[in-house]
Image: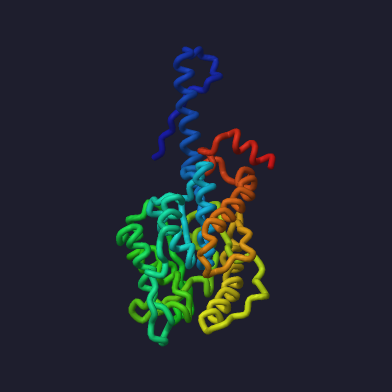
Amino acid sequence: MSTCRFLPTLHERKKIPFRRKKRIAGRLAGALKLQCVEENPMLKRKKTLGLALGGGAVRGFAHLGVLKVLGEVGIKPDYVAGTSAGSLIGALYCAGRSWKEIAEKALDANWRDFVSAALPSRGLVKADGLERIVEEFLGDPDFADLKTPFAAVAVDLTSGRQKVFRDGAVARAVRASCSIPGIFVPYTEGDAVYVDGGVLNSVPADVVREMGADYVIAVDLNDSPLDETVVPKNIVEVVFRSFMIMMRTGTNQGARSADLLIRPDLEGFSYVDMSRKDEMIERGKEAMLRGLPKIARKLPTEIRKNVPKDQIKALGKA
């Protein structure tokens, strides 16, 4: 047996006190709003921003310029994914380090201290130093300890498939993601043999999308043409250059998922020469500044709400 409740309508002939009308109208409005939210789950949550940081060895310093600009305009990613050098920068950033802190530490570091020669079995250089970089900067955190959700991308040579690290020790995930095949000894875990994620996915925009990001900014460090005057002189240069050419194919796979693709002008910059680190940071900054007008026009209001209105207005006209 069903029962019905009859509510007086606001236009009935019977005179209703104004205060009661107001109460009834408020209840009806609240009920309608509640029903609307219940039927549309998307209205319950804010839109989120993801940042994908691509691989590129030493060129990864350009990521710091991108982070600098995002920080200055008040845009903070909700999710970050990184491949190779992007995983190292991303891990430090998601642990709460500012671009400036990362830059100061990286610029002062003697990177030769973090690598050591290996017997020529699976690689020429032991990659344990990559773990030490993260541990020296952060301690030994797990993914759960990070302030921003983060993923590091590697490739399992056993299965031939991409591996996305989202739990466990951050340092080991970064080590796996940065292990350039033939150069660094792969990272092994059980039967899995992990190498640099750039083998399959150099710009993991698709990964950060799967993490839950509604809008994705991706940074590609491999857009500039190869220097055709460079002739590899030894086995290290042959392997490294071959990998960098292969990474360009990996860029295409993940980058398709990006809403905004940032490509710093790194023509003429080496993948291994650290003497121009400051210049690479500046190139990353310049590229992100060029992309800001697109952010101003496309980003959901929730994501750019902290950006000063006059700045958004100026960028929108750029």
Residue 34, image x and y in percent? 46, 37
Asked whether residue 281 is in view, the answer is yes
Residue pictured at 48% horizontal, 62% vertical: 86
* Quarter assignment of residue 243: bottom right
Residue 201, image x and y in percent? 53, 69
Which residue is the extreme one toward the left? 140
Residue 226, image x and y in percent? 65, 71
Return the residue nearer the eye: 13 or 45.
Answer: 45
- Name the side, left or right, on which 28 lies relative to 270: left
Asked whether residue 209 is in view, the answer is no
Residue pictured at 64% horizontal, 45% vertical: 293
Residue 54, image x and y in percent? 53, 63
* Quadrant location, the C terminus: top right
Figure check: 144 above or below 5: below
- Name the side, left or right, on which 305 lies relative to 127: right
Return the residue nearer the eye: 5 or 197.
Answer: 197
* Quadrant location, the N terminus: top left
